Image: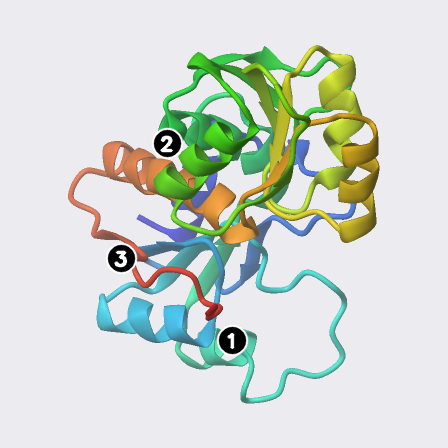
Amino acid sequence: MTVRDIYDALDAKYGFASQADWDNSGVTAGDEIARVAGVYVALDVTNESVENAKKAGANLIVSHHPCIFYPIKQIPSVTSVYAAIAAGLSLIALHTPLDRADEDGTCSALFEKIGAAPAGGSTVCPYLKFADLPEETDGEGLARLLKEKLGGGVTYTAPAGAVIKRIAAATGSAGEFADDAFREGADAFITGEIKYHPLLNARDRGQAVFAAGHYETEAPAMEKVASYLRQSFPGLAVTLEKSGHPISFI
């Protein structure tokens, strides 16, 4: 099979045409007709993931975030783009098509991870999805659930006595969708990261808003991508990155 075969299978499920006009999903490096020896699935294309892909015998990395996002004028040897090309790797990014997906997308994978039942998408924002928790909780309870299930730190604000059952999520850096979530009936909004002042504004408005980590809210979806590729291409070596968060915290 070729890189194009993998692309076509991902396109059939996630629809690359749905990507935002500012996005750069699809084949971002490599040769579409190259034979695929193995696929390495990772949230990001880093120097470490390139090395891990080589060790796994993969010559294609399927990532969430595009390795090439903004226009670039140089490709220094220290960059992951250079490392991937030098290693003969092809790159496919899923980014906003994966974020928009109702099934096996970033939000549905997040909901599954925390035990919430999907309850449909937003009528105004394709990246905003809703779900119901198995039982009501408060702000601290939801924060603890997110920390336990996703593994990262949680920054949040929630009014005293908040009763949370219907949640909304837009993973990654998507704090701008909070107001849409509450207008459509969410008791709480979950994203990956949000700036300080919007979080203060949410506090003043009595909104329950949770930032559970950019990596942590999106990494579960890569398990779904790897599983889909294994089902679509039996016998193909598909390796899911297990190295964890690429940034260190104390």
Q: CA distance from mark 1 to mark 3?
A: 19 Å
Q: Is residue 70 above or below residue 157?
A: below
**Residue type at mark 2?**
Lys
Q: Between tags 1 and 3, which lies in front?
A: 1
Q: Is any part of residue 164 visible from this angle?
A: yes
| Element type where label 1 sits in the image | helix
Please give left or right for residue 249 compared with residue 151 in the image: right
Crowd class of label 3 (few under 14; some 14 to 19; many from 20; radius 10 Å): some
Q: Verify CB contact (< 8 Å) between mark 1 and mark 2.
A: no
Measured from the top left, where is residue 158 in percent x and y? 65, 30
- Which circle marks residue 209 in the picture? none
Residue at figure coordinates x 76%, y 79% from the top left = 73
From the image, tell me which residue sits under label 2: 113
Quarter of image, res 52: bottom left
At numbered mark 2, what does the secondary structure look like: helix, strand or loop?
A: helix
Q: Which residue does the image show at 45% across and 26% down from the upper left?
A: 111
Left or right: 225 in relation to 175: left
Residue 221 percent across, percent down from the top left:
43, 39
